[in-house]
Image (cartoon, rainbow, N blue to C red):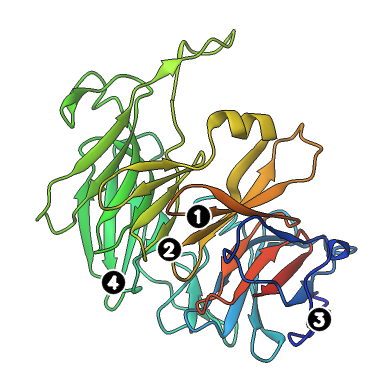
Amino acid sequence: MVLVFLYGLGMAGPVTADSNFSLIDTAKDVIPNLKSQEAIYFDGRLTFSVVEKLAYSPDGHYLAIMYSQSLGQTNIVIWDVLADRKQSQIHCSFDYGLTFHNDVLWDHTGKVISFGIKRQWDAVTGSALPDNPVVGRSARLNETGSKLVTIMGAVGEPSYLYIYDTSDWSVQKIYADGLAVESVAWTRGDKIMVGVMGTRNTINKIIDGRVLAPFDAGIRLLDPTGRDSTRAIWYPAIHDNIPGHAPWRQAVDIELLATNFHFNQVALGGGQIISGDTMAVLTYFSSADIASNKVEPGSGGLAFSLDGKYMFVKAIAWFDNRSPVINSVIDTRSGKKVSEFGGGDRGLAISPDGRHVAIGNVHSVRILDF
């Protein structure tokens, strides 16, 4: 069951600390003032509904709220943003979208919702639609929604990229040179960025002009048309001095979290942004920052503003962190944190018009109006 309590969109004034959500401006003309708040509450007393992921439809009419109600189930509420009411509810009898790699995806019409692979639903009615033929994992749509890419192959094994035309589901397959693709993201111009590791097929062999050692990690930029050659950045493994651990470990987080199509950037796990043009890396949180704050930035959700100038980073605390989690607004041009906000747990989405930010807050969703 979903219980809904709404705070009118016309409410004036900033959000106060009593609402468990605040935004602190640290620079002039950086973030518009918050003027109103709306909240969608889930009944946690009986069903223990926990919000996991959020996604606006392409036209901003609907907000998909994916939540877990119990083990072995996935549920999605389609919320009509314009009418302030529940439009439909989707139920899946197993954990279809709970893994970190599965995003809630809307098709370009705003009528079909899926996790990219196989099962899909009518967003307006909530009814199941015939499965699509997509296979693999980590499905991601390009900027226009005309193409969808997945990673095919077992984790840690040599991978393929499957690129689907969403109009007819025809597929192009690209072999990843024997590497294991751990993550994938589109860049502007329909190129593809991948985070990769070595496999038994590639260790001690020359890859991208260097001999690949165990635990080396790389970011590669691929052109599916083959017109441009592959570009890559590799991070050599580093010594691990922790007793009982392997002597070497991966140097960086190569999880690709979200794309800023406006400035052609990709958010990289571990507090970095990488350029889809130059492959230059911008660090906004150092490993020391992450360790001292005991949070995993971006694990709770990450999204870019409509104009691409800012990135909203939702953090999740480490198990031994009892301090309030502080989330960040990052200037994508400088890498500096310009604002911060508290509250929320998992799930973050920005409306297509850039006027609203939706944040999951365990048993509710908070929608902020700039």
Q: Which residue is mark 1?
A: 331
Q: Earlier in the sequence, mark 2 or mark 1?
A: 2
**Residue under the point 58% across and 11% down:** 242
Tag 4 near tag 3, CB within 8 Å: no
Distance, label 4 to label 3, CA atoms, is 42 Å
Q: Is disc 2 placed on a helix, strand or loop? A: loop
Q: Earlier in the sequence, mark 4 or mark 3?
A: 3
Distance, label 4 to label 2, CA atoms, is 11 Å
Vertical placement of residue 38 versus 288, above or below: below
Q: Is disc 1 placed on a helix, strand or loop? A: strand
Tag 4 near tag 2, CB within 8 Å: no
**Residue under the point 61% across and 57% down:** 27
Estimate how packed mark 3 is, as few (under 14), some (14 to 19) or many (20 or more) residues with alpha carbons within 10 Å.
Answer: few
Q: Three-letter amino acid code at disc 1?
A: Asp
Q: Which residue is mark 2?
A: 117
**Residue under the point 49% across and 51% down:** 101
Q: Which residue is mark 4?
A: 169
Vertical placement of residue 19 versus 199, above or below: below
Which of 151 and 273 lies nearest the eye of the viewer? 273
Quadrant occupied by the C terminus: bottom right
Position of 47 with respect to 74 (left or right) is right
